[in-house]
Image (cartoon, rainbow, N blue to C red):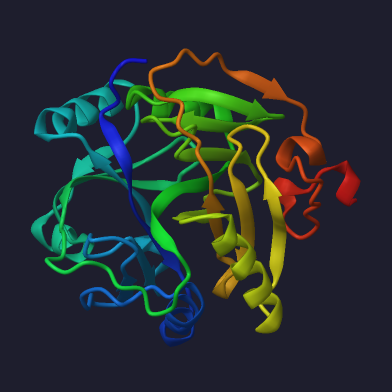
Amino acid sequence: MTEPTIVAPAYARLPVTDLALAGRFVTEFLGLPPGPAIEGGACFRASQRQHDLSFVTDAAATASGFECRDEAAFDRAAEALAGAGFPVRRADVGECAHRLVDAALLTRDRSGNAIDLVLRPHYNGRRCHLLRDTGIRFLHGIGLRSTDVEGDLAFWAALGAVVSDRVGDITYLRIDDHHHRIALHPADRPGVLNTVFAVESLDQVMQAYYHAAEHQIRVLHGPGREAVSGLVFVHLAGPDGTIFSLVSGNDDIGARQHRPRRFPFTTESLCTWGSVCTEVPEWRTEAAL
């Protein structure tokens, strides 16, 4: 694969109506400590970065952030997206300060999902110490709703992302050695479908599952294992329709050749353990109807 201009997810900015309630969920259940204060929102850490997740009350301020490799890649991304017909502008100083980055390109895919391409997200001098032993290690990926999968593929292709696999029309995109960091889910509206955090082991996935049951947090799908990546997962309902996923396992493709595969849109393709999702339309197969 050609070297992508983006190297990893940087953050998810999710819309909520109650910042305090959303904050309690991620601190008490996910164990994420707060990051620096931001106007009109609240941010949280899952790594040594200043923030990996933030909640905002202004739905227009929501976005998925991805880190550019370097300044040259930052400039190439702007040129490639503009050349492919996507709107792109450079964030002003205030917008960058709100995102805790040195620079950002603000753009949208064909579906209308807001995407921030950021340069040098800010780090904290202190390690991230989780408030609860959930085993979260870093922001692994972001699932996006797509009203135009082919149009959105053109957006990500301009940034160097490549297709790893498909389940039906769900499309998994690779930007580094991981099987996928971005997933496009056919939907009737745009938006972030789920925010995915990597945890240390299968034990933490199962602990989250049992802890959710004990605290009346809805488990939307799982525990299970993805057929495409081999990752063990559990998808959990967060505040205001947000979905948080915890994953574990080795999904490293590395330098080996990987030809994209297409799996049928079935329960077994989404979960080799046979877990059925009934509440999320984008993951609801015929077996769940």
Decide if residue 94 is on the left or right side of residue 56.
Answer: left
**Which x, y percent locates residue 30?**
48, 72
- Compared to 3, does 250 lie above or below? below
Quarter holding residue 32: bottom left
Quarter holding residue 20: bottom left
Observer able to see residue 147:
yes
Give whichever of 271, 279 is nearer the camera: 271
Q: Residue at x 41, y 82 (%)?
A: 19
Check the picture and name the quadrant holding the N terminus: top left
Decide if residue 220 is on the left or right side of residue 260.
Answer: right
**Which x, y percent locates residue 85?**
34, 26
**Which x, y percent locates residue 203?**
58, 61
Q: Residue at x 48, y 70 (%)?
A: 134
Q: Residue at x 68, y 21 (%)?
A: 262
Report the label total.
Answer: 0
Q: Residue at x 55, y 65 (%)?
A: 242
Observer able to see residue 193:
no
Give whichever of 249, 114 is nearer the camera: 249
Decide if residue 30 is on the left or right side of residue 38.
Answer: right
**Which x, y percent locates residue 204?**
55, 63
- Compared to 58, does 87 lie above or below? above
Decide if residue 20 is on the left or right side of residue 225.
Answer: left
Quarter holding residue 101: bottom left
Give whichever of 10, 240 is nearer the camera: 10
